[in-house]
Amino acid sequence: MAAIELQNVYKIFGRRNKEALKMVQAGVSKADVLAKTGCVVALDDVNLSIGASQISVIMGLSGSGKSTLVRHINRLIEPTSGKILYNGEDIMQLTPSGLRKFRMHHSSMVFQSFGLFPHRTVLQNASYGHIVRGTKKAEAEAIGKKWIDAVGLKGYENKYPSELSGGMKQRVGLARALAADTDIILMDEAFSALDPLIRAEMQDQLIDLQRNLAKTIVFITHDLDEALRIGSKISILKDGQVVQTGLPDDILRNPANDYVARFVERRVHIPAQAGVSK
Amino acid sequence: MFPKSLEFSISQPINDFVAFLIESYGETFRAISNFILSGLLQIEWVLRALPWWGTILIFMAVAYLCVRNYKLPLLVGGLLMLAGMLGLWDLTMQTLALMLMATLISCLVGIPTGVLVAKVRVMRNILIPMLDIMQTMPSFVYLIPAIMLFGLGKVPAVLATIIYGVPPLIRLTSLGIRQVDQEVVEAALAFGSSSRQILFGVELPLAVPTILAGLNQTIMMSLSMVVVSSMIGARGLGQQVLEGIQTLDVGKGLEAGVGIVILAVVLDRITQGLGQSQRRD
């Protein structure tokens, strides 16, 4: 069952975005739209359904619109046109307070550069989701503490983010998202700022946690290996368009076009290419 | 010769406008005036009621709380002691009361305005040029409307001091808020915070060091208004400098000047210390 569905989502940055939208829909190329209106087309007719209780990976290079895309799901960025459905309900119709409630109870987020509150302790950071919705402090902190333990940061509750290493900071980010107890977790390049070893460790931890929690996770990455490792389903984004969606195996075996094929080849042939000279 | 026919004067319309203000809003100005005066008198009363050593001890304690070492409190205590020994105690306390009142109102006006400037683009476009004008206009010019609206004495002195001193606080409050890491604000939003929760729970706390730097600037600029504001009847150290100039009593003028410097150093170091103790990476 699809928990989140994006239907014909367009996002165009710039003042004359309505005009640009019409041009894009009429099939004008992005370069021409930029030249004529000064608008940047970030998402171009994105249709995506994201399954409940699994990790869906959206993969693309920088500039492909993946971070913009994930921010549409909790409406940190508003689409220029299109529908965003959560369990069949159009979240574009939510009032400001309805949107706040949706964010509080249904979606949390993990950020590439962590987005921790530097003036709050690890514990206060982790319990933030509950503090915002007005849970009593003691109760909120008990929940925060439970998740700090779960991500392996026991004993660091009263440290400030500046006292932690990158990997630890992102564990706090993860604990904060998990503690908020939402069914959706959006992860925007959550592990990209970490070094390879810590990164692999965090991926394992995420897979482990997911086994028990069955959250709907939308994971953004530019790294195919990471995508294949943790994703149940992978969508590949290029220039604001979804070029292929499928199981990891599908992507590897039947790349939809040259762009995807190049990604896959690089990965599959790296060991084979060793020693081959041109 | 510049042709007479092209000349025009803005002095008459401005005079008319000030006259109109006084006629229509006299009550309002009187209320503001009374509010400022009573605040000022209360601060003065407290400073005078305290024994001199009590005041010095309080300053030393505040300095200690701000920096958590013994060097600054000793410096502060020594400097205030020196001011007293130069026979400037009462004058220093009068000037200090005026400073405190002006700073208090500057905060009440400056910080909310700074937030507004940071949040509302239109406000930024209107207020930033106004702040530029406020800071470049010779400080004497402020005395004129202040006197017209509030007469002579302490109240117009406080007001002129505020107008001259508040721009850096507004600027740095706005800067501090806009400097807050966008991803941190996004994180707060993503968890469903309201704009009020973001302002008071995230943006303002993270802007505190910058706001304190602005406060420090405001106090320093206010102190530089001390002599000017004594020309419209504010008593204190400024008045003595003025008397020194008028009677060619160089020594007396310089003595009071030393008093102003002492006050400046004390307030500057304390607010700077406070700003640095708030800084956390």
Image (cartoon, rainbow, N blue to C red):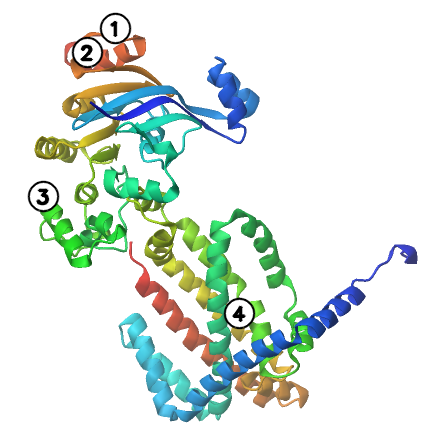
Mark closest to the chain's N terminus, 1 or 2: 2
* Residue A76, quarter of the rendered image: top left
> How far is disc 2 from disc 4 in space, using C-alphas?
69 Å
Instruction: Judge depth for marks 2 and 4 and give the one in front.
Output: 2
Q: Amino acid at mark 4?
A: Met
Mark 2: amino acid: Asp
Numbered badge on residue B221: 4
B33 and B226: which is toward the camera: B33
Question: The residue under label 1 is which amino acid type?
Answer: Lys
Q: Nearer the viewer, residue A232 or B205?
A: A232
B41 and B240: which one is in front? B41
Q: Residue at x 66, y 72 (%)?
A: B25
Q: Are marks 3 and 4 on the same chain?
A: no
Q: Which residue is mark 2?
A: A250
Q: Which residue is mark 1?
A: A278
Marks 3 and 4 sit apart, C-alpha to C-alpha, by 53 Å
Left or right position of A173 against A152 = right
In the rendered structure, the residue with mark 4 lies on which chain? Answer: B
- Of the numbered discs 2 and 3, the one sitting upstream in the chain is 3
